[in-house]
Amino acid sequence: MDQSSANVDIKKKQQEAPTPQNTPIFSAPINSSSEEMETIQTPGTREAILANNPQLMSLLQGRLGGLVSSTNHLSPEVRRRVKGLKSLQRKHTALEVEFQKEIMALEKKYLEKYTPLYQKRAEYISGKAEPTDAEVEEGASDDEEEKDKDDDDDEAAAEKVEGIPEFWLTALKSHPQFSELITEKDEGALKHLVDIRLSYFEKPGFRLDFEFSPNDYFTNNILSKTYYYQEEPGYGGDFVYDHAEGTKIEWKEGKDLSITVETKKQRHKGTNKTRVVKKTVPAETFFSFFTPPVAPEDEEEIEDEDEDIDEKLEIDYGLGEEFKDNLVPRAVDWFTGKALQYQGDDQYDDDFDYEDDEDEEDEDEDEDDDDDDDDVPAKDEKAPECKQQ
């Protein structure tokens, strides 16, 4: 075979080779396998890619087949011991499942202990009750006490305020994730949010209840969002997110925040008359939280679904967990902004000030550079300036 024929064959093989494609993988425990690690299927992404690329499918099957039979090269005695290890792993998985169930039971137990505190919190926020002097003293910090003394004269002249106005709206807007969901139009409705409650039920999962005072936007007193887990725990014993359900919001006429009405003028070509056509389109709103995304059940519908459905499911699941684990338990810290100090690595910023030390070292180096530059001719004096840029 001559050199030209070889080059043609190489180019042909390169054209036939499957093109690598990136596919999203869940970081949250959504729809994972139960006991043994299996191929995780993501609707609308992996199946479509593999179905449209037989060569990639064949390649993956070959590699997976090699992994499954990777113990065939071992001696019978070693393979027997590996099977023994698998038996131990199954027992370990069973204990992990038991561990997760006990954690869930413990969460339910302590929620019953938290509930009286949450009920008092709701009464203080709504103005139905006032905190005791002992509670005020215990909850006050030095800075607050000093400020309270300065404001004593202003309290008499101030108007009487009932409860803590816009408590939950302020807490939500302080939270980085929830603040991104709240539009200016949403604030009018969220001002009437008087409580957020958490509850568990017999099946794995939890419910969030959002209580609203009478308002001009919807007739619902309570909007609920329920998150369900799969009956069988996933790999590692964790509960696996299955789906979520939300309350249908009964919007008052002309107050639906989930849609926007667009008006357009149309001119008839024959009569030259104009008419106004109104069209409703979806609008961004916090209240879309109560209409969770739904994964398609029929494989034929996958192609018609939004390609980002997996990402939307994961985000929705994460919001529910954030409500459950952070916002509801520490609402007052989000209201005051204290909770922001403990987000990510920011909690260490107040304890360590590495930047100042680095700045001092940089200043010392700059001073040394300046001393060295004293003997440099005037035409080179611009060099340090360029270095700072």
Image: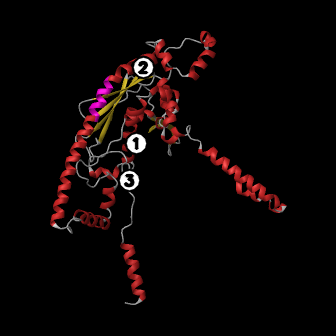
Secondary element type, mark 1: helix
Residue labelled with disc 1 = 315
Percent across and percent down for residue 41 are: 29, 53
Which residue shows up at 45% across the image and 34% down it? Answer: 286
Marker disc for residue 24: 3
Q: CA distance from mark 1 to mark 3?
A: 13 Å
In the displayed structure, 53 sits above or below 97; it is below
Q: Nearer the viewer, mark 2 or mark 3?
A: 2
Callout 3 crowding tier (Cα within 10 Å): few <14, some 14–19, many ≥20: few
179 sits left or right of 249 in the view: right
In the displayed structure, 43 sits above or below 163; it is below
Percent across and percent down for residue 1 are: 37, 90
Q: Earlier in the sequence, mark 1 or mark 3?
A: 3
Residue 105 falls within the magenta-colored stretch: yes
Bounds of the magenta span?
A: 103-112
Which residue shows up at 48% across the image and 41% down it? Answer: 344
Residue labelled with disc 2 = 121
